[in-house]
Image (cartoon, grey):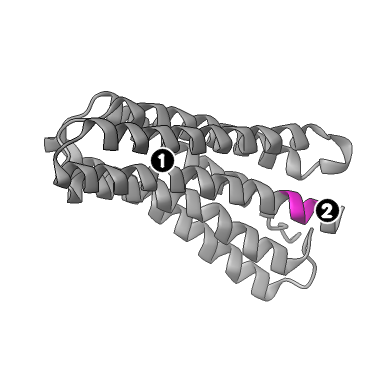
Amino acid sequence: MEKIEFNYFKILREMVEGSMAAATLLNEILNDYKPSELIARMSEMHEIEHSNDGLIHITQSHLIKEFLTPIDREDIQVLIEELDEPTDSIEDVLFALYMYNIHEIKPEALKFSQLICSATNALYEAIIEFQNYNKNSEIRDKIIEVNRLEEEGDNLHLNAIRNLYIKEKDAKELLIWTRTFDKFERCLDDIEKSANLLQSIILKNF
């Protein structure tokens, strides 16, 4: 029986699909925010995160056994671990909503959520092109788009925190939303780190 080759590129795509699913779920939660449903929604989010963890374990088991890999095995290991970070960070936002007992969502949170969705989509388009990089240079444009969205997120974070400290008088709310906005920004930072690592691996391997 012919041995079926393990498709590392497919696993990488599935990792980013997990991030897109997490971003979409967070966006849905925020746009129809119901604090009473957060526990159930956290369970949904954890299933996505757990699925990504499973992909990492499967990949690691193949890396240990296989002699030849399509790109450097250490690059695969580092990349798949980095691609897991956005999903973890998105889940952390949901944890913050629950832990801080947030009952109303600020407009800036909705803007952050949309940026996160756009950034995960751009990262996915980049990872699709990764396998055929030599034949298609569009991946560079997708990575640049992730960088642009992260920069937009930095500006949003800057102004969100400033507006918070101008308008909010309650010290507890100041602390809660400062930390929550930081978690939103972390999502975009992690997506950009994944895109930048992808770029570095391309320069090394192709």
The spot of residue 22 in percent (x, y) is: 41, 40
Disc 1 and disc 2 in contact, CB within 8 angstroms: no
Residue 200 inside the magenta-drawn segment = yes
Answer left or right for 92 relative to 79.
left
Circle 1 sits in a helix, a strand or a loop, which is it?
Answer: helix
Inter-mark Cα distance, 1 to 2: 29 Å
Disc 2 residue crowd, few under 14, some 14–19, many 20+, Cα 10 Å? few
Q: Quadrant of residue 3?
A: bottom right
At 83% across and 35% down in the image, what residue appears?
137
Answer left or right for 132 relative to 31.
right
Residue 73 inside the magenta-drawn segment = no
Q: Quadrant of the N terminus?
A: bottom right
Circle 2 sits in a helix, a strand or a loop, which is it?
Answer: helix
- Residue 40 shows up from this direction: yes
Bounds of the magenta segment: 199-203
Tag nearer the camera, 1 or 2: 2
Q: Is residue 96 above or below residue 121?
A: below
Q: Is residue 64 above or below residue 7?
A: below
For disc 1, the marked residue is 22
Q: Residue 203 has which mark?
A: 2
